[in-house]
Amino acid sequence: MPKYLIHGKTSSDFAAAMLNKPQDRYEMLLPFFEKFGIDVSEFVFTSGINFNFVSVLQAPDDASVDAMVNIVYSTGNFSNISYARAYDSKEYKSVFELGHDKMSAYVSSMQVAGTD
């Protein structure tokens, strides 16, 4: 399954809820992740300024991750949350091999304008 990196910044609403009733968010969300067929390998909160939550997960596809992230974002628990597809070194090499094989078909605007 493809691997994804999620990072976000929790909101003041999240902090208020956690102070009011401390909870293990991973344990609470595990059934939610399972509904999407998502396997979470890392689920950590950090002391960062721009983001303070990071997760590494595997999911069936981009649509599953996008749907999951949008549900989480809609709750107001995060002021910012995003995800990116993550590749191991062999997968990333394959991405560049694909680009290498297809790059001769690309025509830049500078080539068309005759400035290249």
Image (spheres, helix red, strand yellow):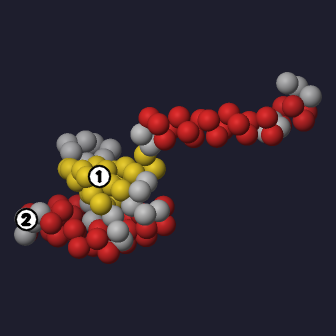
**Badge 1 amino acid:** Ser
**Crowd class of label 2 (few under 14; some 14 to 19; many from 20; radius 10 Å):** few
**Extreme residue in the top direction:** 116
Q: Is residue 38 above or below residue 114?
A: below
The residue closer to the viewer here, 72 or 16, is: 72
Label total for image: 2
- Considering the image in quadrants, where does the N terminus appear? bottom left
For the residue labelled by badge 2, is the local secondary structure a helix, a strand or a loop?
Answer: loop
Residue 7 spot, x, y in % from top left: 34, 51
Residue with the mark numbered 1: 55
| Left or right: residue 94 compared with residue 74 | right
**Crowd class of label 1 (few under 14; some 14 to 19; many from 20; radius 10 Å):** some
User: Whole-Å distance between the Cαs marked 2 and 1?
Assistant: 20 Å
**Badge 2 amino acid:** Pro
**Residue shown at 35% from the left, 68% from the top:** 37
Q: Is residue 2 above or below residue 67?
A: above
**Residue shown at 29% from the left, 68% from the top:** 33
Residue with the mark numbered 2: 22
**Residue shown at 7% from the left, 65% from the top:** 22
- Considering the image in quadrants, where does the C terminus appear? top right
The residue closer to the viewer here, 77 or 53, is: 53
Residue 49 spot, x, y in % from top left: 27, 42
**Residue shown at 92% from the left, 28% from the top:** 114
- From the image, state whether disc 2 or disc 1 is nearer to you: 1
For the residue labelled by badge 1, is the local secondary structure a helix, a strand or a loop?
Answer: strand
Q: Is residue 97 above or below residue 70?
A: above
- Res. 48 image quadrant: top left
